[in-house]
Image (cartoon, grey):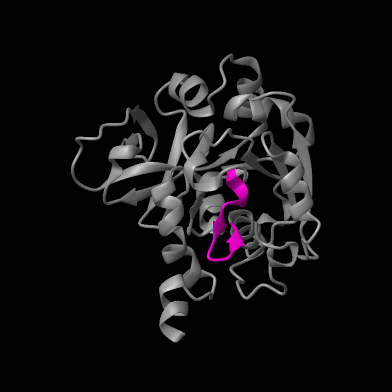
Amino acid sequence: MPGRRDLITSPTSLRRGRCLGSVDILVLAGGLRTRIRPALGDTPKVLAPIGGRPFLSYLLRWLASFGARRVVLALGYGAAAVQECLRGFCEPDLSVTVVVEPRPLGTAGAVRFARARLHTDPVLVMNGDSFVDADLCAFLAFHHAAEAGGTVLCATVDHPGRYGRIATDSNARIREFVEKDAAFAGRAMVNAGVYLIPPALLDTIGAMPGPSLERDVFERLPAGSLAAFGGQFDFVDIGSPQTVATAANVLAPLFGLATAAETEGAG
């Protein structure tokens, strides 16, 4: 696992706005990493080494670049390793606190478990195993203008077969979450795993059963309840050994780091 001093660099060279200063952020990082075990062994997925740094470092640096001040990490498997890694955290304006699930709760369960720590309107909730290089200030402005029950950040990808697709109406409201279809060909908009959730929707999540935020909550809401903020963003999902192996090709250039191929070429 990368050393603690590699967690995040300071000061960050990314400065995109200060819009998240008054927004609580919940990072869902308690998954069991079943599909990714061959690539990571006992390493928690959020600490997957990407370009010599834990994946968490990219997420925190990205959030800090938008002025984020308070992050809650919802942990499960490997919580002790993540907490040890956080001891090297050195972004002075960003506070990171941890909640540890007593057992695997799923994404919806993790939101319920952390609910008492979330106080702002809206709350930014994001998966801890994906990254999308979107303008979070534009995302937040869109959410306020849409006046929907919540807003989903979506990315248009070339090969959406391994994801569920998002179908919207003419007002950018989500009318359907389409199931995964490996045979689907062509570009499509997919759920990028980042959400702006007002208190009312947090309460709805708390009242609804089921472990999955997407399947057990979002897909059961009336059509049009949620808005979709979409774009052609760089998107990384480290849910499989293949995507872990290629993630640095996307992340390293965005964060001013050399890719493995560039490092080998320089040698």
Q: Can you name the residue that lies furthest to the bottom here?
A: 266
Q: Residue at x 32, y 27 (%)?
A: 179
Q: Residue at x 66, y 61 (%)?
A: 2
Pinpoint residue 169: horizontal percent, then vertical percent.
31, 35
Residue 49 falls inside the magenta stretch = yes
Residue toward you, 82 or 24? 82
* Residue 233 image-quadrant placement: bottom left
108 vs 132: above or below: above
Residue range corresponding to the magenta coloring: 45-54
- Residue 150 in the figure: left or right of residue 200: left
Q: Residue at x 58, y 44 (%)?
A: 45
Pinpoint residue 236: horizontal percent, then vertical percent.
44, 53
5 vs 229: above or below: below
- Residue 56 in the figure: left or right of residue 222: right
Residue 258 falls inside the magenta stretch = no
Q: Which quarter shows the N terminus? A: bottom right
